[in-house]
Image (cartoon, grey):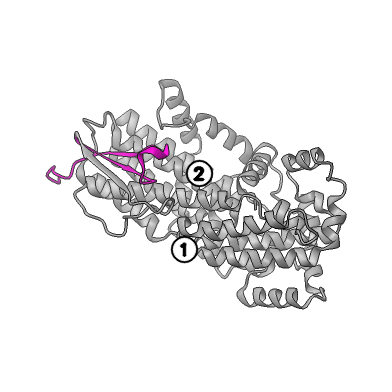
């Protein structure tokens, strides 16, 4: 479901305007009318009805997927979502993002002072977020019945909480040389990110990968401080960071979850098509492209004419995608390529599924690649940190992104690990001071 485009379009809109948060949002009220899939439920098409029955049995419809069995008192998400005033979140997030360094986690004196001031101003919320994580579960509520108008402010809330911990880590590290204090914040950052990544929604899952990149940038700053050749970090602290990254891997959600959520959004999208509201699904980029192709005005009628056949194609394709998630990305790519090739072969025929082929199944591989790169980065860090602390970890041999063995280089007192397993790939290696031979404190 065009994950990169939707992250940019939906989240940028939410941060800038605060839209999509409450029941008063007209887009959401309209979309919720289709949450129970009235058109699909009444279809006379036998294969499509059979597939719907299977999805009901699997709990994969928008209504069933949005149900939570976690009591509010046990749910960390409930406490986290109550930390900030909704109308203030976009402004706070813009301020935090302006402070957070681009690229490496480095601060000049003025930026560090801004980070410390921002964290002090919201210290109560930071402390309360930590307290929330003591609850036994974290289940962020997503109203799949609202389709793409669903409230995704959980992303903003977690991003704010992670930024506050990052600024706390910066203060500990760069003002006090307190490596332990920075690692304490990192543990919280990773726990928050893991909860966000577990949400079965493609946009939320892929945004979690970006949040985790920020956390890994803080890890890099900690292990290199003040100089990678003379770091303050100890062997024991490297081992603690290795344990944090391995815990992320041990609790890693199945890739399939995001695409099960994506399928539910797709089912909702077909209800909009049946109602003549295909335009509600289009990004600005798509509108411009379809206008350039001179087909924008014809798309709604073309999509509605074959909507049942189109949706069946989509659901069967997504079943293949979800089943393919049992395999690592480098093996799964063949499934994604088969779908793309079949759509291309049908492109100029009456069998072409307009909605699936032009809107819903676009750039599937890109979204899966983001998931794989996220996993590969964390695995590379876990491997490098473990080796640097004198451990020989198991199960961290092959990059899920490329299928190549992780490339490990050990020289001049540092360890380098390439997440892709290839120096020529263009990815930057993880670099950690090698303290394996240093006596543990």
Q: Position of residue 371 (x, y in %)?
A: 50, 52
Residue placed most toward the observer, 309 or 201? 309
Q: Is residue 125 visible?
A: no
> Is residue 270 rendered to the left or right of residue 388?
right
What residue is pinned by disc 1? 327
Looking at the rendering, in which quadrant would you find the C terminus? Answer: top left
Q: Position of residue 370 (x, y in %)?
A: 51, 48
> Is residue 163 rendered to the left or right of residue 55?
left
Q: Secondary structure at mark 1?
A: loop
Q: Quadrant of residue 67?
A: bottom right
Which comes before the other along the chain, label 1 or label 2?
2
Q: Quadrant of residue 412?
A: top left
Above or below: residue 290 compared with residue 27: above
**Residue at x-position 56% and y-position 65%:** 322
Q: Secondary structure at mark 2?
A: helix
Tell me if mark 1 has few (under 14), some (14-19) or many (20+) residues whose alpha carbon lies within 10 angstroms of its own. few
Q: Is residue 423 magenta?
A: yes
**Residue at x-position 63% and y-position 41%:** 8
* Residue 210 numbered tag: 2
Residue placed most toward the observer, 329 or 34? 329
> Is residue 71 rendered to the left or right of residue 44?
left
Tell me if mark 2 has few (under 14), some (14-19) or many (20+) residues whose alpha carbon lies within 10 angstroms of its own. some
Q: Is residue 134 magenta?
A: no
Q: Position of residue 24 (x, y in %)?
A: 77, 51
Image: magenta residue range: 413-441
Q: Is residue 1 visible?
A: yes
- Circle count: 2
**Residue at x-position 75% and y-position 56%:** 355
**Residue at x-position 49% and y-position 56%:** 195
Residue placed most toward the observer, 31 or 78? 31
């Amino acid at each position: 479901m065009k994950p990169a485009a939707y992250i940019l379009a939906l989240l940028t809109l939410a941060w800038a305007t605060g839209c999509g948060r409450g029941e008063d949002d007209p887009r959401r009220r309209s979309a919720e009318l289709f949450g129970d899939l009235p058109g699909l439920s009444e279809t006379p098409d036998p294969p499509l009805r059979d597939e719907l029955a299977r999805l009901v049995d699997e709990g994969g419809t928008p209504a069933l997927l949005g149900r939570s069995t976690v009591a509010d008192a046990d749910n960390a998400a409930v406490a986290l979502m109550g930390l900030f005033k909704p109308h203030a979140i976009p402004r706070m997030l813009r301020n935090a993002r302006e402070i957070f360094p681009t690229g490496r986690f480095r601060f000049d004196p003025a930026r560090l002072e801004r980070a410390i001031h921002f964290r002090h101003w919201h210290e109560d919320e930071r402390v309360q977020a930590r307290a929330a994580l003591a609850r036994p579960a974290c289940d962020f509520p997503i109203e799949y019945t609202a389709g793409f108008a669903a409230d995704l402010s959980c992303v903003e809330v977690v991003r704010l909480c992670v930024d506050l911990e990052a600024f706390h880590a910066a203060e500990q590290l760069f003002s006090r040389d307190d490596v332990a204090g920075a690692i304490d914040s990192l543990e919280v950052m990773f726990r928050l990110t893991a909860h966000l990544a577990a949400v079965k929604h493609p946009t939320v899952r892929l945004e979690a990968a970006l949040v985790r990149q920020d956390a890994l940038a803080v890890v890099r700053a900690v292990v290199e401080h003040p100089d990678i050749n003379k770091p303050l970090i100890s062997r024991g602290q490297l081992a603690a960071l290795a344990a944090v990254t391995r815990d992320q891997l041990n609790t890693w959600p199945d890739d399939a979850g995001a695409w099960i959520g994506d399928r539910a959004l797709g089912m909702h999208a077909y209800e909009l098509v049946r109602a003549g509201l295909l335009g509600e699904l289009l990004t600005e980029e798509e509108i411009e492209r379809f206008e350039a192709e001179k087909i924008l005005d014809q798309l709604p009628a073309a999509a509605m004419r074959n909507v049942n056949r189109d949706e069946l194609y989509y659901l069967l394709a997504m079943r293949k995608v979800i089943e393919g998630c049992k395999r690592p990305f480098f093996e799964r790519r063949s499934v994604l390529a088969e779908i793309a090739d079949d759509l291309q072969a049908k492109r100029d025929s009456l069998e072409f599924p307009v909605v699936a082929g032009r809107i819903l199944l676009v750039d599937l591989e890109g979204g899966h690649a983001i998931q794989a790169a996220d996993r590969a980065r964390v695995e590379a860090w876990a491997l490098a940190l473990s080796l640097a602390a004198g451990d020989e970890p198991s199960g961290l041999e092959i990059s899920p992104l490329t299928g190549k063995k992780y490339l490990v280089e050990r020289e001049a007192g540092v360890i380098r690990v390439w997440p892709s397993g290839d120096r020529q790939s263009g990815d930057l290696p993880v670099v950690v001071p090698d303290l394996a031979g240093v006596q543990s404190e």
